[in-house]
Image: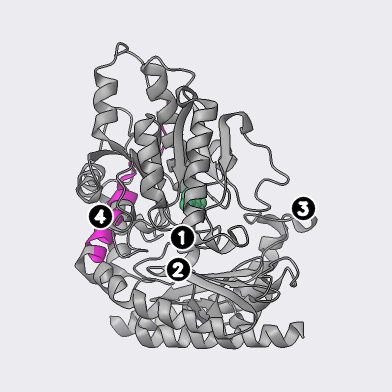
Amino acid sequence: MAAMREIRRNALTATAIAASEDAVETARRHLVQPWPFAGSVGAEARALIGEGDGIYITDGDGKRLIDGPAGMWCVNVGHRRKELAEVMYDQAMALSYNTPWYTMNAPSAELAERIAGHAPGDLSHVFFTTGGSSAVETALRFMQFYNNVRGRPEKKLILSRGGAYHGSTYLSASLNGRPRDRDWMDGADELIVKLSSPNPFRRPAGMSVGDFADFLVDEFAETVARIGAGRIGAFVGEPVQASGGVVIAPDGYLRRIREICRQNDILYVSDEVVTAFGRLGHVFASDDVFGIEPDMITFAKGVTSGYFPLGGVVISARLMEELRRSNHPDAMFGHGLTYTSHPVGCAVALRNLDLLEGGVLEHARQVAPYFQAKLKTLEELPLVGEVRGAGLMACVECVADRESNDPLLIDKDVGKRIDAHCHELGLLVRPLINMCVMSPPLVISTEQIDDMVAILREGISRTMEDLR
Ligand code: PLP
C-alpha cells in the first residue's frame, strides 16, 4: 500500500514537472498574481511550486528548495502533514459546510474555546474570518459598531504606523504604511491617522534607542491630545512589523502605547496575523512576549499552518458585556462572511493546534536563539547593514555602505538578486526591495538552519560580486 502510494506520488511529481512549462504559460495567459506591476499585469507568473515536504518545497524543474518564508509566514508545522490532510478529508465527509448565521458547528465552538484559553486577559470571544485582511476589517468594523451602540459615533479614527502591513481589503489596506503600498492605490484616508514607523534601525541620526522610544511615545500621546480621544476609536499595530521588514520596536514602547490607549478608551488591536500560532514560540505573542493585554487580537496564517484559509478576531469579554448592557439591544452588527466558522478550516486548526502544543512551540522556542545567532553572522558581509529578528522570523537588510546605512543608493533589486542566487543554490527567499525576510517552518532543525544560512551567505556574496 505504502509502495503504491510512493509510485503514485512519483508519477504525480513527474507529471507536475512535465506540466510546469505549460502551467507557467497558462498562468501568464489567465492568472492574475498578487501585487502585479501595470507593465506585466496578468503575465507575472514565475516559478511553479509543485510539492512541499517538511521545510522543503520543489519547484517546477524538480529542484528542492528550503522554504525560507514558509509560504507567506504561514506553513508553521511544515508541509505534507498527513494529520492535517486526513482531518480535512474526515471533516469534509462529515460536514463540509453549514450556514454560520442561524446554525453552528462543533469544530468552531471547540476552536473558539481553545483559542480563548491561550488569549491574554479577558479575551474570550472569537469571530472567525477567511484570512488576515478580513480579520483586521472585522476588528475595525466591530470598533465602529461598538462606538455607535455606545452613543459615540464620532469616536472612529484609527491610529496606524509607518512600515505597517494589515491587509488588502479597503479598510485594512488603508492602514498600510510600507513604501509603495499606497503609491497608486486609494484608501479611506479620512479615517486613518498615521504615526512614525517604530524601526530603531531607521531612527533619526544621533538619537539613542531610548530617546527614540520616548519620541514615539510622545508622538502617540501628542496625537491623541491634538485630535482628541473622543474622536479616536482604535490603534492597530503588529507586535513585530512583519512585512515592513521584521521591525522590533524599542523595549517597553508597546506597553507604554497600551497604557495611553487604556487611559483614553482607545481600543488596542494587536495584529498577530503573523506572530500568532508559534512564530515567536507562543500561541499569542502580545502578552507572552511583549507583556500587553490588547482589547482585540487578529490572527490568521499559522492558525491552520496555511492548509486552509482561516483567520479571526479574539475580542475582550468586557466589550461584549458593554454591548449586551447597552441601550440598543436591537442594534445589529451588520457583518458576516459566508465562510465564517468554516467547519473544515476549524477542524484543521484544532489538529494544527494539537501539533503546536504537542511539541512544535517548544521546538520553536529552543531553536530560535540558534536561528537568530546564525543569521546575525551575516553582518560580517559588507552589503549587510543589519540582521534583526525575534523567534523564527528575521530580516537581513542590505545597505549601500555602513557609514550611511542608505538603502536607496544600492541597486533597488538587490533583494531579488539575492533571491535568484539563493534559488539556484536551493533556498527560497522573500525579497523586499533591499531586504530578505526569513521565517521558515517552525520544525526546522539546527542542521537545516546551518544549510539555510550557508546558502544565504553565498547568495549575498554572489550579489556583491554582481554589484561590483
Ligand atoms: N496583517 C498582517 C500583520 C499581515 O502580515 C497580513 C498578511 O501578510 C495581513 C494582515 C493580511 O492577511 P491576509 O493576506 O491573510 O489577508
Give the numbered dot on residue 38: 3
Residue nearer the viewer, 267 or 169: 267
Q: Residues in magenta?
A: 333-356
Say which residue label 2 marks: 389
Among the two numbered marks 3 and 4 on one chain, the one whose residue lies closer to the N terminus: 3
Q: Amino acid at mark 1?
A: Ile
Residue type at mark 2 is: Gly
Q: CA distance from mark 2 to mark 1?
A: 7 Å
Q: Whole-Å distance between the Cαs marked 4 and 2?
A: 28 Å
Q: CA distance from mark 3 to mark 4?
A: 41 Å
Q: Residues within 10 Å of mark 3 (few under 14, many from 20)?
A: few
Q: Residue 222 location in percent, x, y? A: 52, 35
**In the picture, which quadrant includes the C terminus?**
bottom right
Q: Nearer the viewer, mark 1 or mark 3?
A: 1
Element marked by disc 4: helix
Residue annotated with mark 1: 248
Q: Position of residue 26 (x, y in %)?
A: 68, 63
